[in-house]
Image: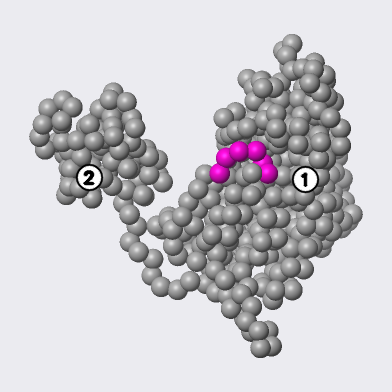
């Protein structure tokens, strides 16, 4: 027998050091290249339990039924992986595993003869109660003389995983049935569905920029672009830029992103959000902002230009010669931005790539975690692309390096210029690249403009923002001036001004109809 009867008199685990979050991340990702879990210690387990249940950690008492355990395993495999601790109550009390029915327990609970039987039980559960089988590594750790099984689940590569005939996902510490959008994302992550090749049903082939398509075929493919419409459609379908849908040929997601005159009209998530904040946090006053639209190559160009016009040049002496070093060098910025757009998860339809400049750093946020089998530790070494068609075209056009080479060359450029190495992390459902400044700005950020704050929160629109600025500069604004300043129709002007009065931002001070005047409320 591997363990003794240790289930009586359960004790709560006392508070552990504040590194619980780090322990959760380490246990949740405890997998080497072969997929084996590593050995855990009692100290690590205590820290993990003290941190509580979360995105990558689940507690289950030994009496939990098989359906509930299978549900938890499938949700972890579908949601980035993690650790299920069997023998721990929801409140973090270490209960241990039962080896015999305790005399003071009257309800029917699971009892197994020894630790080996418990191991076999959970392995069988992961194989026979989940579809496909959830890969799991089981490890035994004793806490206060009580046995706990840690079931390490990697981020699954055969998603979606089902338990009891249903697909579950994990959001923080809660498990719920996958929505249609979440199910689609899991299919994309598994490679069973390539989102970039899906049709954009309401789009037309005419929305592809003819000049861009011709340039691609002439400059990259070295073949003429047919004049015949049917031949064009057939060629675009063969290359994955279009597909047949509902009896028509329509652009695919990749085709519209790469060659659409304005893809954002159909795919709002293709907008690049750029912002340059005073200070070191979001929410402070903006120095500069831009919403960049157009085909992907143009978005990359204009995003890089946004950084170039806002970065600083830092003087450095090389011998007797002065050299100006950009705090964020061109190649690395363009490569990071292009990677964020090329490899992002396009199934996350409401999420945009975001470029944030602060006084001390540049951050680029790309929707979607790293696709399996890529890990943070293997970035720049392993090669894999979530969107192979988009990546191939951007490589052909010289916007990104071959998969795997770009990050290595970014590191080389930063080292050559004696700049801090770029940092990579996963944050929620995003992948984040951070460049640290060698010359952070100093000083106190000015007080935020209240009108700018309202605009950023979505409480007022851009027309109302311009009208409030006009009233601040000129003392008042009349309805006819609102139309002149904003270009709005008279009915829209009336509605916008009434809304500002209702929000307590403007007061009516005189006039009637077209000449009604408003001023800022003190």
295 sits left or right of 373 in the view:
left
In this rendering, the answer to whether 241 lies above or below 18 is above
Residue pointed to by mark 1: 397
User: Is residue 90 or residue 117 the one in the foreground?
Assistant: 90
In this orientation, does residue 481 appear? Answer: yes
Mark whose residue sits in front, 2 or 1: 1
List x then y, in percent, for residue 499: 27, 33
Judge from the rendering whether residue 230 lies leftward or rightward of residue 93; answer left or right: right
- Nearest the viewer among 334 and 363 is 334
Whether 119 is drawn above or below 420: the answer is above
Name the residue carrying label 2: 471
- The region drawn magenta spans 292-297
Query: Which mark is drawn over residue 521?
Result: none
Q: Position of residue 62 (x, y in %)?
A: 72, 46
Q: Earlier in the sequence, mark 2 or mark 1?
A: 1
Is residue 115 among what the camera can see? no
Q: 10 Å neighbourhood of mark 1: few (<14), some, or many (≥20)?
A: some
Q: Secondary structure at mark 2?
A: helix
Q: Is residue 328 magenta?
A: no
Colour scheme in use:
one colour
Q: Residue at the location (82% across, 51% down)? A: 403
Left or right of residue 465, residue 98 in this image: right
Tell whether position 293 is magenta.
yes
Question: Is 191 above or below relative to 88?
Answer: above
The reply to whether the C-beta atoms of the residues labelled 2 and 1 are less than 8 Å apart is no
Residue at (38% x, 44% y) in the render: 455
Classify the position of the N terminus by image quarter: bottom right
Give the distance between the C-alpha atoms of the residues marked 2 and 1, in whole angstroms. 48 Å
Q: Residue at x 49, y 57 (%)?
A: 276
Looking at the image, the residue that sits furthest to the top is: 247
């Amino acid at each position: 027998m591997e363990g003794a009867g240790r289930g009586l008199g359960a004790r709560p685990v006392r508070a552990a050091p504040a590194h619980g979050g780090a322990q959760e991340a380490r246990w949740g990702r405890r997998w080497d290249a072969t997929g084996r879990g590593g050995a855990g210690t009692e100290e690590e387990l205590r820290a993990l339990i003290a941190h509580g249940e979360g995105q990558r950690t689940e507690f289950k008492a030994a009496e939990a039924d098989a359906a509930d355990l299978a549900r938890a395993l499938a949700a972890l495999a579908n949601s980035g992986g993690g650790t299920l601790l069997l023998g721990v109550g929801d409140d973090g009390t270490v209960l241990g595993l039962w080896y015999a029915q305790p005399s003071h327990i009257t309800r029917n609970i699971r009892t197994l003869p020894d630790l080996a039987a418990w191991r076999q039980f959970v392995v069988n559960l992961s194989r026979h109660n989940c579809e496909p089988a959830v890969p799991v590594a089981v490890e035994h750790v004793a806490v206060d003389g009580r046995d706990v099984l840690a079931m390490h689940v990697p981020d699954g590569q055969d998603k979606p995983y089902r338990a009891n005939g249903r697909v579950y996902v994990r959001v923080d510490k809660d498990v719920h049935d996958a929505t249609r959008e979440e199910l689609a994302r899991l299919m994309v992550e598994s490679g069973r569905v390539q989102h970039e090749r899906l049709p954009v049903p309401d789009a037309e082939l005419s929305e592809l920029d003819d000049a861009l398509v011709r340039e691609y075929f002439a400059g990259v493919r070295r073949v003429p672009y047919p004049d015949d419409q049917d031949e064009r459609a057939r060629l675009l379908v063969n290359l994955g830029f279009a597909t047949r849908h509902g009896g028509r040929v329509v652009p695919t997601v990749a085709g519209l992103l790469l060659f659409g005159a304005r893809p954002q009209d159909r795919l709002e998530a293709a907008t690049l959000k750029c912002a340059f904040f005073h200070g070191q946090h979001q929410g402070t006053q903006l120095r500069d902002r831009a919403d960049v639209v157009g085909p992907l190559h143009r978005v990359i160009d204009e995003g890089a230009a946004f950084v170039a016009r806002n970065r600083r040049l830092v003087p450095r002496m090389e011998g007797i010669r002065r050299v100006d070093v950009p705090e964020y060098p061109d190649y690395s910025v363009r490569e990071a931005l292009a990677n964020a757009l090329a490899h992002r998860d396009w199934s996350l339809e409401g999420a945009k790539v975001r470029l944030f400049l602060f006084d001390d750093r540049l951050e680029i946020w790309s929707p979607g975690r790293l696709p399996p089998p890529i890990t943070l530790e293997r970035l720049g070494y392993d090669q894999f692309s979530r969107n192979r068609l988009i990546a191939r075209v951007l490589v052909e056009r010289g916007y990104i390096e071959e998969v795997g080479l770009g990050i290595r060359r970014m590191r080389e450029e930063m080292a050559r210029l004696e700049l801090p190495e770029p940092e990579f992390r996963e944050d929620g459902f995003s992948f984040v690249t951070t460049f640290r400044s060698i010359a952070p700005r100093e000083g106190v950020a000015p007080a935020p403009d209240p009108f700018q704050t309202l605009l950023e929160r979505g409480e007022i629109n851009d027309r109302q923002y311009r009208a409030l600025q006009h009233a601040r500069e000129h003392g008042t604004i009349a309805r006819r001036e609102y139309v002149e300043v904003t270009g709005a129709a008279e009915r829209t002007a009336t509605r916008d001004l009434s809304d500002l009065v209702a929000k307590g931002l403007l007061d009516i001070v005189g006039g009637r109809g077209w000449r009604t005047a408003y001023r800022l409320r003190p």
